[in-house]
Amino acid sequence: MARIELEGISHSYDSSSKPEDQREYAVSGLDISWPDGSANALLGPSGCGKTTILNIISGLLYPTAGRVRVNGKDVTGLAPRERKIAQVFQFPVVYDSMNVFDNLAFPLRNQKTPEKTVKTKVEETAEVLGLADRLKFRTTGLNAADKQKISLGRSIVREDTAAVLLDEPLTVIDPKFKGELRRKLREVQNRLKKTMIYVTHDQHEALTFADNVTIVKDGRLIQKGSPEELHAQPATPFIGYFIGSPGMNLLDCRLEANRLQFADFELPIGQDMKEKMASYGKDFKFGIRPEFLDVAAEEKNRAVAFTVAVIEDTGAYRVLTCDRESSRIKTRVTESINIREGDRVWLEFPEDKVNLFYNEQRIV
Amino acid sequence: MKNRGWLFQIPALAILSISAFIPLMTVINYSLHYIFAGSAPTFVGFDNYIEVLRDPAFQGALIRQLFFSMGILAVEVPLGICIALSMPRRGPAVALCLVLLGIPLLIPFNVVGIIARVLTQSSVGLIPEFLALVNYDFNVSKYPVDAFATIFLLDVWHWTPLVALLCYAGLQAIPDAFYQAARIDGASSWKMFRYVTLPKLRSVLIIGVLLRFMDSFKIYAEPLLLTGGGPGDATTFLSLHVARKAESYQLGYAGASSFIYLFIVIVFSYVFFQLMTHIGKGENQ
Amino acid sequence: MKKRYIFLICYLVVLFIPIYWMINTSLKTDNEILKELTLIPKDLTFKNYAEIFTSPLWRSSFMNSLIYVCLNVVISLIAAIPAAYAFSRWKFRGSHHLFFWLLTNRMAPAAVFMVPFTELYYTLHIYDTHLAVALAHCLFNIPLAIWILEGFMSGIPREIDETALIDGYSFPRFFGKIFFPLIAPGVGVAAFFCFTFSWIELILAKALTITDAKPVVVTLTVGIGAEGVRWGLLAAAGVLTMVPGAIVVYFVRNYIAKGFALGRV
């Protein structure tokens, strides 16, 4: 097991002789470190450069600039197998002509491991994955979820595997097996304490799997932290909106005397906050998570009146979409207050839960 | 509505009835009669079949045919795979390779025969002249081995591109992830070929082997044009043998032998098909 | 990496030696062909080609070939498309047997069918017409076309049919507007194969024609075996028979890779 580090990684698929600064970069200036034995996620919208990063880590791509280190050792020039980094792909990769046992044994046999060791290792791995009773089965008859377990199994069966990369491993899995496989992945990580990097565009998968989430957008790292940190202190409005369901409410506002002026209402602010904001400028983006808004059915001091436009019931909670002229805010209500569509509600914005962004960067 | 499927078969069946079914029935009818020009056919039961099976000329043609068919499969399939593997995966060279490989497939059989004649003409053909350099006296109309080898190589030349194109199509359909995974698993290039490429090519190889096997039985024009089936009967394959009998109006014999021929091709094709669909699927059970 | 390209180039060179030799021979005078071995024509001449282009016999036989080949492609596709659709969509009683029986037609020895074909087409009064050859070639082309098309059609999810029919498309409209464009590459490949096998076939074409529909493949064989074969002329005609093929290959080149696996990779 190992620590994986990226240092100043940039990559361009443009191999023409243009000067470096004019090329289009798929990823640029990445510095990321994943500690030994950690469960990590690499999260970003489609096309943000996730797969490029993955291929650079696994060694399938040679970066235009920067170094990749495994346990401090520079492996940038090494082939995938020399790095001992395994990968689970979107589509389950199994060798159809072999049965489950031989599939799991394949990486070991390629290293000329004695058959006895192969047998014990494969059985151990199958046990962890819950495939022990199907070792003699043909792979062609298995469902995609089991095939994906075999792909994972092949990567963890070798003791010297430095890290496992999971590239959107649930994409082709039947919805009814998704949950089970996700739990299994998490459980395997917990039990074996192998460094794993889970790449996905699905925030739910990332947040449930990982202790540590890295968010990438347009080839750049924008935030790295625990799921809680990302939730409470998003570095940019994008993350605020991307993480959480529904995403963070984002409104433009202007700093006036000692209040924030919005398009259709205003909010008073404290002295500390005002001073801090004044040092940046005047125009800000105001963000608050739907679950942190206080909702009341009666008029209340310091609360702003909105009209409920839509109520969505998700079972665990209700999402209210509230309008005030051109402003729209979503809130999450757990307790059963009696509200119907078209009613007026009063929303309170607790100052300690507010995020303020200036120039797309979080300042408060 | 359960049998609406048959409705859609009507056009195909209507045409096949006059281009396959009726002729086939006629052939079977011939095979059960003694037919001689001018006189009315007499029913002779299976006499024609017995005569065919006992005929050393038929036996010779059959053995030669099987030897030839197995031989070309043994050469064309591996060679086709090698060519497909060596072709570039992308870029402008791909289209060029595909077109170049496609051209021999579109040369009519008798043009292939003519090419063979031109290349092997005694005294001025390219091949005899070339082999004369190493003191080999090459003459297709004198030496059976030379004639057989020429037909064999001609078939390999003509049809290996088909196998190669099939395999190339199969290779293109293998996702990169399989090779990446195998590389990560530390597989040698031989193992990658054995456990990734070959199993994934199975379905196209089945098609290739079946097509080549069925068509190799039809070889006719090339030996006819090269040496007329000779020297002796060195290049008299099954089709040529049967066609000669039909041309000399021994219709009973021709009908019986062609029915036996059809039976053999179907049985072999069926066995191939079964073998190839099951190889690699159940070997670990 | 480089080694495999050397192998490929060597193979392609060997592949083209016979074709080059044909072209080479076609550009020589008969005298030169018979007297000595020359790698390039010493006495370059286009006389052989000129003779073919001016001879009505050659011209008409080229036309005959093209006519019955195209006719065959059209007939084969018209018959094969509905049949393949049925095989790919429904399991009907006896469908497996029928499919296998169709395939066995592909295996049938053309040499054997010569005589029955002649008799049958005489009776139908189509002997020595383009239609006769086109129909005879259906023997192996319809099964092949069904096989190829069935492969392509099976790759298209059945839900598409259902959705279209639920959306109120009539079956013919669905087939023409939605389904056909989806299988167009498959139809192209099937047409290509039918063209190929019909174009290169000799035995039936020879048996079913005398003069009116005599194809170029037959004209080519005439005179071979006799003394004083005109090799230059034959080679030139041979080169010309490759031209339609080369044109067809050029047009389908983008589908070749996908199509050669007969739609079942």
Image (cartoon, coloured by chain):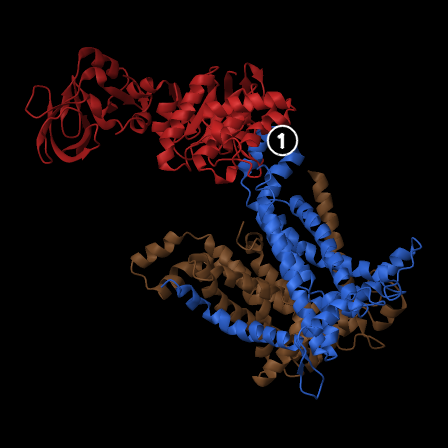
Chain colours: A red, B blue, C brown
- The residue that appears at 18% across and 18% down in the rendered structure is A350
- The residue that appears at 55% across and 42% down in the rendered structure is B174
Q: Compare residues B130 and A270 and report the one nearer the observer.
A: B130
Rendered location of residue C256, percent (x, y): 58, 55
Three-letter residue code for mark 1: Ala
Viewer can see residue C127: no
Rendered location of residue A282, percent (x, y): 24, 22
Answer left or right for A160 relative to B161.
Answer: left
Q: Compare residues C149 and B92 and report the one nearer the observer.
A: C149
Quarter holding residue B188: top right
Q: Residue furthest bottom?
A: B38
Q: Quadrant of the C terminus of chain A?
A: top left
Q: Counting other residues with Cα less than 10 Å from the Cα at mark 1, is it few (<14), some (14-19), or many (20 or more)? A: many
Answer left or right for A305 relative to B273.
Answer: left
Q: Is residue C260 above or below residue A207?
A: below
Q: Residue furthest left?
A: A299
Viewer can see residue C102: yes
Rendered location of residue B8, percent (x, y): 43, 67
Rendered location of residue C65, percent (x, y): 63, 74
Residue on which the image places disc 1:
B187
Q: Residue furthest top?
A: A272
Q: Is residue A338 above or below residue C175?
A: above
Element marked by disc 1: loop
Q: Is residue B218 above or below residue C132?
A: above
Label count reads: 1
The chain containing the residue under callout 1 comes to B
Quarter holding residue C58: bottom right
Q: Is residue C160 above or below residue B60?
A: above
